[in-house]
Amino acid sequence: MSYSIGEAAKMVGLTAHTLRFYDKEGLLPFVKKTSSGLRAFTESDIEWLKIIECLKGTGLPLKQIKQYIDWCMEGDATIPQRLNMFIEQKKRVEEQKAKWEKHLEKINFKIKYYEDAAKHGDLNVFERNPKLLEEKKRLFKD
Amino acid sequence: MSYSIGEAAKMVGLTAHTLRFYDKEGLLPFVKKTSSGLRAFTESDIEWLKIIECLKGTGLPLKQIKQYIDWCMEGDATIPQRLNMFIEQKKRVEEQKAKWEKHLEKINFKIKYYEDAAKHGDLNVFERNPKLLEEKKRLFKD
DNA sequence: TCTTGACTTAGAGCTAACTCTAAAGATTAG
DNA sequence: CTAATCTTTAGAGTTAGCTCTAAGTCAAGA
């Protein structure tokens, strides 16, 4: 059993346009075509799409995703490169998560700030709540 | 005391080009100029840049960052909008974090997979370790 | 004063990742 | 068999966010 490009697109939350674009960019060398030229996505292809989505969703550029796919097509000799790639990606994701943690603190501060401002209808927040000023200094000092 | 565009850029990890681009896009209406036309960034301006970085770094498009800056310039009447904006952004960051968590599980799976493959020099991982196949099914089922 | 380097503007160019169009061929429901 | 709805290709267009250039102005050290 296989899926048309439209069905495959729906399954992974992309458009058929995007899948064709990925194919053109060389990201889908594994997708075969029917005798009449239509792309036929197998279950295994859908899994490929999911791992592509995983890498793209964690910020890896399409070019590097293509590099990974190319390695996969080359065979067992590239196993170390592929392993290394996922280790690097894990590192990047964890760094990014740490960054977001810091950003989130600033956002939480702003929420507290504007909640007080909204309650009183003005921005004299630090006069009412000097501790918040301390928090601001701590968060924005760098 | 104030900073030139180059100094300000260095302080927030951007280039002077980028700061000029932001200014052109209306993100820095608060930055004043000297009598001879040079931008002079104050400590407070640097803080603005940091909050812009925070919003950009959590994926808010420049257009919406500009919207926020515009609200700030309009005065106290827009406090509710600004509060709401940060609440929404917090929500987005937390959703994104959850997504990354899921992606990270897949990446960790791939690391385990390729570690075994690298150790044995081939991809017969699931024959050696059927439990990993179960994990794969769980992670990629959707 | 001269030189060096940073700054100014307007505007062109670039990259990533789509997004869409047109014209033609394939598939499917009735 | 036909009409509607896919799918195909090549290629143009779009958007966000820079990134760079040119030609000129300004500032600071020897």
Image (cartoon, coloured by chain):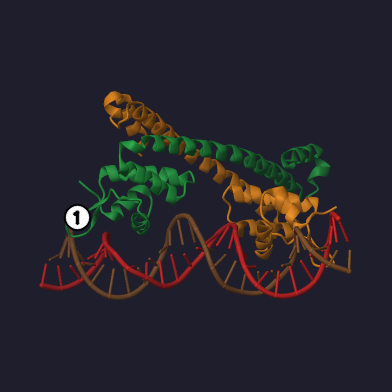
Chain colours: A orange, B green, C red, D brown
Mark 1 Cα shell of 10 Å, populated few (<14), some (14-19), many (≥20):
few
**Residue visible at 75% across and 56% down?**
A76
Q: Is residue D2 above or below residue B76?
A: below
Of residue A8 and residue D29, the one placed in the foreground of this image is: A8
In the figure, is residue A70 to the left or right of B92? right
In the rendered image, which quarter is residue A21 located in? bottom right
**Residue visible at 23% across and 58% down?**
B38
Query: Which chain does the residue under circle 1 lie in?
Result: B
Q: Secondary structure at mark 1?
A: loop
Of residue B136 and residue C21, the one placed in the foreground of this image is: C21
Q: Is residue A141 visible?
A: no
Instruction: Write down the residue under mark 1.
Output: B34
Q: Is residue B136 above or below residue D10?
A: above
Q: Is residue B115 above or below residue A45?
A: above
Q: Amino acid at mark 1?
A: Thr
**Residue A130 location, x and y as percent?**
29, 25
In the figure, is residue A133 to the left or right of B54? left
**Residue A46 location, x and y as percent?**
75, 51
Q: Is residue B125 visible?
A: yes
**Residue visible at 43% across and 44% down?**
B55
Which quarter of the image is occupied by the C terminus of chain A?
top left
Of residue B19 and residue A120, the one placed in the foreground of this image is: A120
